Each structure stands twice: as C-alpha cells, then as structure tokens.
Image (cartoon, rainbow, N blue to C red):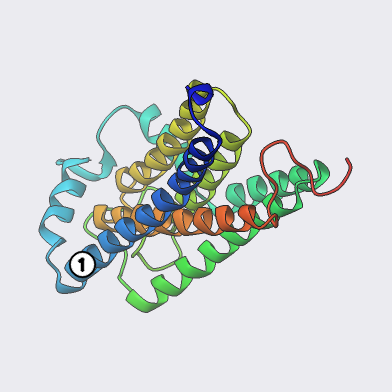
C-alpha cells in the first residue's frame, strides 16, 4: 500500500500514525480521570454505600461473616494474588526492571518507569489522606491493612506498574498478537489484584473502582509524556539504546 502513495502521502500517513498513540493516551487519561471524579463524588455523598455493602455481604458465608465464600484454597489464592499489588512486590518488580533497563542502555525508559511508579505512590498516598475513608467493618478482614480505604492503593499501584510495564514490553514487540498478549496480561493482573481486595473484605468495591480509574489515568498520562519525550529523542525508540551496552 505504501508503494502506491506519493512521498507526500507516505509522510502524511506516517504523521497520522505517530499521532494515534498520543491522542489515545491523552483521551484515556481524560476518560479515567473523569470516571474517578464522578465516583469520588458518589463516595463522598454516600451514594455507593448500599451497593458496596451488598457486594461485600454476597462474598461472605451468611452464617459466618468471617468466612469468604468458596473453598479454603480460594481464600489462600486471593491472598497470594493480593500480594502482587503490595508495596514489597511492586517495589521489587520496579527496581529489578529499572536496573535491567539501565543495563540495556535504555536510560530514558528506566527513568520513565521509576517516575511513573514513584509518582503513582505519592498520588495514592495523597488521595488516601485527602479522603480518609474508613476501611469496611461490615465483614472481618481476611488480611492486615494499615491505611485509609479510598482509593485502593493495591488496585491503583498495580494499574500504574503493570500497565506501564506492559506498554514498555509491547513497544519492543513487532507482532500484534504478542503486543495484545502482553497488554492483556497486564490488565488481567490488575483486575485480579483489585478483585482480591474486595473478596478479602479489606476494601469497598468503590475503593477498587476508584483505584483502577485513577491508576489507569496516571499510567495514560505517563505514557503520553513518554511519547512526547520520544519524539524529542529524550526517550529511546524501540530497539535504540542511550549508550553502548
């Protein structure tokens, strides 16, 4: 198809393709930020309490609210999955991948990942302090918690970390099938972490939805910035290195 286009036509097509990524990332940031604002307003007004309570109670044995529904192995699995969104695991993953990127000469990508995760952590902490929503006491917690409830830090930071990692890995792949698998894995992991927080009774469902929304908004914003820096040569393009390995 490219061979049928004039040089001017090929240039126009290339520019159009280069604009799709920034436009999609900026649109995603706006959409998810708007969803978070709407949800936060509903939470602040107490409009989500009824549906939050219904969902939490539906996930517990009515004869023993300390017992989540399902076999014992499911509860243990939920604890394992929720650990994927904990500070320890996310810090280990972020530091390991950052070092790997630096060793590969991709300094720009390493800085992008570190800034995205650290910035997301600070944002999550600030939002928790700002809203100061108590943890649900409707059912006993099946794991320990130490911070405020809204938005879910596990849901938010897993979205920030895994979606950013997924995007970075997808950049270096040429086949669309592999790109789709990598991003799909990042999304599924993020969703499972959030669902595990609800199942274990440590978050209201609206906390998790809020965490997903603001986490996805932050990840989209970081990716938009990365694409702009890539255009200026401050972040490596796929296959490039900032220094000889």
Residue in view at x 17 percent, y 47 percent: 55
Does residue 136 show up?
Answer: no
The answer to which of 225 and 53 lies nearer the viewer is 225
Q: Residue furthest right?
A: 244
Q: Is residue 239 left or right of residue 83?
A: right
The residue drawn where x is 76% and y is 42% is 100
Q: Is residue 206 visible?
A: yes
Residue situated furthest bottom in the rendering: 130
Q: Is residue 138 above or below residue 84?
A: below
- Across and down, in percent, residue 40 comes to 25, 67
Residue 203 on image: x %, y %: 32, 55
Quadrant location of the C terminus in the rendered image? top right
| Left or right of 122, for residue 96 | right
Q: Is residue 115 above or below residue 77?
A: below
Residue assigned mark 1 = 43
Rendered image quadrant of residue 175? top right
Disc 1 crowd rating (10 Å Cα; few below 14, some 14-19, many 20+) is some
Q: Is residue 85 above or below residue 117?
A: above
Relative horizontal placement of residue 47, taking residue 218 as reference (left or right): left
Q: Position of residue 26 (x, y in %)?
A: 41, 57
How far across and how far down the image is residue 226, in percent? 58, 55
Q: Is residue 39 left or right of residue 124?
A: left
Residue toward you, 238 or 50 = 238
Write the residue at 37% across / 42% down. 196
- Secondary structure state at the residue bearing disc 1: helix
């Amino acid at each position: 198809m490219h061979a049928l286009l004039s040089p001017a036509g090929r240039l126009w097509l290339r520019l159009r393709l280069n604009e799709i990524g920034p436009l999609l990332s900026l649109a995603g940031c706006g959409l998810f930020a708007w969803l978070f604002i709407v949800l936060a307003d509903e939470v602040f007004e107490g409009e989500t309490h009824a549906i939050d309570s219904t969902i939490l109670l539906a996930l517990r044995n009515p004869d023993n609210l300390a017992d989540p529904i399902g076999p014992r192995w499911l509860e243990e699995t939920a604890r394992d999955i929720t650990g994927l969104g904990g500070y320890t695991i996310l810090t280990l993953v972020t530091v390991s991948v950052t070092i790997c990127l630096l060793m590969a000469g991709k300094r720009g990508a390493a800085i992008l990942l570190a800034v995205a995760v650290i910035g997301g952590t600070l944002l999550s902490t600030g939002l928790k302090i700002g809203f100061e929503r108590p943890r649900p006491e409707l059912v006993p917690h099946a794991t320990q918690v130490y911070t405020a409830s809204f938005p879910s830090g596990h849901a938010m930071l897993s979205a920030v970390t895994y979606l950013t990692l997924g995007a970075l890995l997808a950049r270096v792949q040429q086949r669309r099938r592999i790109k789709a698998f990598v991003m799909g894995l990042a999304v599924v992991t993020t969703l499972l972490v959030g669902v595990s927080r609800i199942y274990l009774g440590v978050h209201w469902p609206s906390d998790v939805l809020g965490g997903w929304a603001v986490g996805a908004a932050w990840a989209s914003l970081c990716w938009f910035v990365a694409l702009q820096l890539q255009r200026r040569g401050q972040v490596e393009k796929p296959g490039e290195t900032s220094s000889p390995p």
